[in-house]
Amino acid sequence: MQNVEAISVGRLSPGTYLDRRPAGAELYLDGEALTLRQFVCYLLGYMSFLGIVTLVASVAAPLVHDAILKAIGSGHLYAFVLNSGTAILFLLLSALLVTVLWSLYFLTEVVNAKSRYDGAPPPP
């Protein structure tokens, strides 16, 4: 039974391909060149962090709306706070969208296109 488990885990593992440097420009973080695996991990971690912050902000906004309205009234300060909150949420959603699209591109075009980086001819 252990051989079957080892074979199945071996087939699902991407191998050493993700532990190499990407072709083209080097990816650096804190002065250290990243492998494909490290870059994907950092990218997905950043996307998860942005998602959690955006979720907390979008859930907290309606919950604190009435308290803010009572505390500062409905004057110019309220309009400023409302517009600032809207701008912050817009920036969070924009950053999240760009990160999601970038990770989808990276995972589909770079990680799964092994032949381009293995020196093999490109598929027809």
Image (spheres, rainbow, N blue to C red):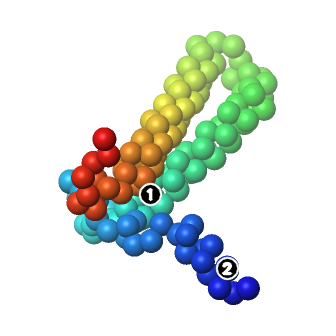
**Residue found 72% across the figure and 36% down from its top:** 60
Mark 2–mark 1 CB contact (< 8 Å) = no
Residue 72's tag is none
**Horizontal and vertical percent for residue 36?**
37, 62
**Left or right for 28, reference 18:** left
Is the residue 105 above or below the residue 120 in the image?
above
Q: Residue flagged by tag 2: what amino acid is it?
A: Glu
Q: Quadrant of residue 8?
A: bottom right
Q: Residue at x 46, y 37 (%)?
A: 101
- What residue sits right under mark 2 in the picture? 5
Residue under label 1: 40
Other-residue count near label 1 (Cα within 10 Å), few / some / many at <14 / 14–19 / ≥20: some
Identify which residue, 68 or 121, lies in the foreground: 121
Disc 1 on helix, strand or loop?
helix
* Picture coordinates of residue 98, whole percent (x, y): 45, 36
- Tell me which residue sits at (44%, 46%) in the image: 108
